[in-house]
Each structure stands twice: as C-alpha cells, then as structure tokens.
Amino acid sequence: MARALKGLVGLAEPVETDLPLPDYLLEEFHWMPNGYYSHNQAEGYNRGFELSMMGLIQGARDTAAQRLASEGARTALDVGAGTGRQAAALLDAGVDEVWGLEPSPYLLNIAAAEFPRVRFVQGVIEDCELPSGYFDAVAACFLFHELPAEIAEGALSRLHACMSRGALLAITEPGPAQVRTDLVSLALRHGLRGLWFGWLGRFVYEPYLDQWHDTEPAGWLARHGFQLIQDREELPFRTLLARRC
Ligand SMILES: C[S@@+](CC[C@H](N)C(=O)[O-])C[C@H]1O[C@@H](n2cnc3c(N)ncnc32)[C@H](O)[C@@H]1O
C-alpha cells in the first residue's frame, strides 16, 4: 500500500538545534504538523504515543530491556530515544550506563528532565560519532519503520561499528499484520484490540512503513554483520533480536 509523500514540515520557532536535519526527518509523520520538531508536538507525542498503543508499548520496552540486561550488558544505547522511556527501562533492568541518541531537541528536553541518569546525545544514527565497539547492547523501539530504506542500511552499519562483538540488538516495531490483515479478520482474531490497531495502522501517516514491512530481516541484518536470533510477531508488535558478529 504505497502512499504519496506529504510535504516537508515547517520547523517550529525557535529551532533549538545546530544539527542539520535531513529532509526525511522533517516529514509530516503521524499527521503531526511539525513532525517531532516543536514543543507542543513533543509534549503531545510523549503522552499520546503511550495512549494510542493502549499502554502496551512500555511492556515491550521493558521486555527488550530485560532481555538485553540478562546477558550482563554494562553499556547500552537507546537509538531513536524519543522521550527516553526505552533508555530508562534499560537502567531499571540493571544496565549501568545508558546512552540515548535522538535528533529532536524538543523530545530530548523532555527526556533529559525526566531521566537525568541517561546520557542523551543529539544526532542521527547514520551520521553520528559514537565510540566504536563500545556498547554491549542496543535497543531501538519504533525507529526503523520511520527511516527510508537507504537510511536504515546506514543506521545498521553505524550500530555495528559502535557495538562490541557478541552484543545484542533488540528491535521493536509495528508488526505487518496490523496493516496487512483485513479489519474483519483482525477483529475476529483479536477483538477490539485488533480493530483499534488495524484502524490506527491505516489512519496514521507513516511514509516508510511499507518499505519497512517489505524488509526481510535475516538478510538485512546479515548484510551488516548481525545474526538474527529471534523474530516474533504479536499484535501490534514485531520484535527482532540479533547478535553482532
Ligand atoms: C516513534 S519515535 C519512538 C521514540 C522512542 N524510541 C519510544 O520508545 O518512545 C521514533 C524516534 O526516532 C527518532 N529518529 C528518527 N530518525 C532517526 C535517526 N536517523 N537516528 C536517530 N533517531 C531517529 C525520532 O526523532 C523519534 O523520536
């Protein structure tokens, strides 16, 4: 279901960043008039995302964090950190040192105020300067379906560079069933939850979602030096776990 791209958003003033923001980041994700780039949208997003996911997204973040921590990770990166909830889950799971990488200064302001123990860094993963071989674990929650395919390739290659050998990567994204199963079947299988997530997936504008669902995870990960060790779909999520070779 390919959708035409909408226009680029205008930045809210003042733009609190010197970081050059690539065009794909300024698209009108989720019908938000300034993407992730205004105070109002950032605050609304911080609350609205949790609600729209019926409270299930925090459980998915916690599960990913606990799995990463279970192998004794001491350093972890939350990539596409948003308002920092995945990073905080990693700390809660027992990881000593957690970094959060996020391009939007508006989201970072909220994250830094709420979770002062996380080391937040502004930047985009495909073009950032993170220490090489440093992280024992990386979590990405709802990042990759928002990246154009070529950016997702660059992102994975940068992640490989900043992770230690044997480190785990946990990716949580929307599952394809949400938009690729018809609404009647979703309702019959999952009741109101199925109807809600089916409607949400069809209504919310996500310019790169189809590209993401077309990605074959094992091959994509292998091309960048990762081995897929788990691929699980449970509405509304698909979770991938991979080991850096
Ligand atoms: C759907 S939000 C998810 C936020 C957060 N992970 C969570 O669990 O709430 C996706 C986030 O990825 C960030 N992002 C988009 N492109 C990125 C990139 N190239 N590198 C790092 N972060 C990016 C966006 O600014 C946004 O905050």
Image (tube, rainbow, N blue to C red):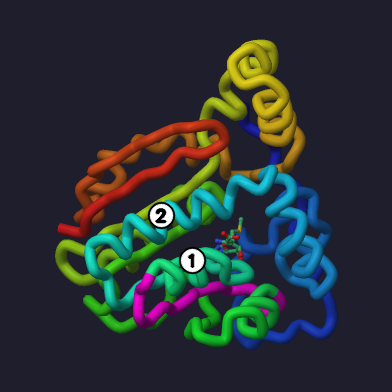
Query: What residue is shown at x 31% (from left), y 48% (from top)?
Result: 241
Along the line of sight, which residue is nearer the eye, 95 or 221?
Answer: 95
Residue 186: quadrant of the picture: top right
Report the quarter where the N terminus lies.
Answer: top right
Q: Is residue 36 left or right of residue 100?
A: right
- Evaluate if marks 2 and 1 touch, with contact meaning CB atoms under 8 Å apart: yes
Query: Tag 1, which secondary structure?
Result: helix
- The three-letter code of the residue at mark 1 reads Ala
Along the line of sight, which residue is nearer the eye, 83 or 27?
Answer: 83
Query: What residue is shown at x 83% (from left), y 59% (from top)?
Result: 33
In the image, is the residue at mark 2 within 8 Å of ligand 1 by its beta carbon? no
Residue 89: assigned label: 1
Residue tagged by mark 2?
64
Sooner in the amino-acid sequence: mark 2 or mark 1: 2
Report the quarter where the C terminus lies.
Answer: bottom left
Q: Which residues fall within the magenta stretch?
A: 94-106
Q: As displayed, is residue 143 above or below residue 54?
A: below
Query: Tag 2, which secondary structure?
Result: helix
- The three-letter code of the residue at mark 2 reads Ala
